Image: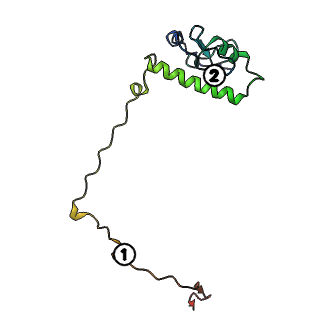
């Protein structure tokens, strides 16, 4: 049986970007703030498993206390939904920080925008269809006070 595990993504430059940053996890009652103990916290991703750390692109800048809480302290203390909200917000803030600092290229530098299609030329005024004003609209039947009923043969009864 083949091993379908992908090669890990490693980037020391991306990991070193956590030095001197503020904590992006900010667990209430756990985070002490500051920038002295901030490290790159790996989040369990698809590549995570036995004897394998998660990819380096799945990191959040976190202080020592939030990192310890994320690794093995949250179970039974907060719900999984709250944990995932902190993780998603932390990943977004970390990635945005790395892009602003130039450690990751901006999406506009990675992808070229689509070419805009040229607009069709306008018709000459004499070739345009006229839009009738309200006075020239065709008039329909007026509403009757009693509902119309149809006979079985399709004619109306009065």
Closer to the camera in the image, 29 or 137: 29
Label 2 residue SS: loop
Q: Name the residue under label 1.
A: 137
Residue at 26% across, 63% down = 128
Q: In the rendered view, would you say 42 is above or below 128?
A: above
| Residue at which label 2 appears | 45
Asked if one can make out residue 49 in the rendered structure from this viewpoint, the answer is no
Percent of width and height locating residue 11: 52, 12
Residue shown at the point (43%, 27%) measured from the top left? 107
Element class at badge 1: loop
Q: Which of marks 1 and 2 is nearer the N terminus?
A: 2
Residue 17 visible in the snapshot: yes
Tell me if 86 is positioned left or right of 79 in this view. Answer: left
Q: Colour scheme in the image?
A: rainbow
- Residue 147: where, in percent of width, then height? 59, 84
Residue nearest the observer in this picture, 76 or 113: 76
User: Which quarter of the rendering shows the C terminus?
Assistant: bottom right
Identify the mark at residue 90; answer none if there is no mark. none
Q: Which of marks 1 and 2 is in front?
A: 1
Asked which quadrant contains residue 87, the reply is top right
How many numbered circles does the render carry?
2
Image-quadrant location for residue 30: top right
The single residue placed furthest to the top in the displayed view is 36
Q: In which quarter of the image is residue 26?
A: top right
């Amino acid at each position: 049986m083949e091993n379908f595990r992908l090669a890990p993504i490693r980037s020391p430059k991306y990991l070193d970007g956590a030095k001197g940053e503020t904590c992006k996890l900010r667990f209430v009652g756990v985070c002490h703030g500051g920038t002295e103990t901030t490290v790159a916290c790996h989040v369990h991703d698809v590549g995570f498993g036995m004897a394998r750390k998660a990819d380096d692109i799945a990191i959040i800048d976190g202080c020592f206390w939030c990192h310890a809480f994320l690794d093995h302290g949250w179970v039974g203390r907060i719900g999984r939904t709250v944990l995932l909200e902190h993780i998603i917000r932390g990943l977004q803030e970390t990635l945005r920080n790395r892009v602003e600092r130039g450690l990751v290229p901006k999406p506009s530098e990675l992808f070229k925008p689509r070419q805009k299609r040229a607009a069709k030329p306008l018709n000459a005024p004499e070739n345009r269809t006229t839009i009738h004003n309200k006075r020239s609209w065709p008039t329909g039947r007026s509403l009757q006070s009693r509902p119309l009923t149809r006979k079985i043969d399709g004619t109306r009864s009065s």
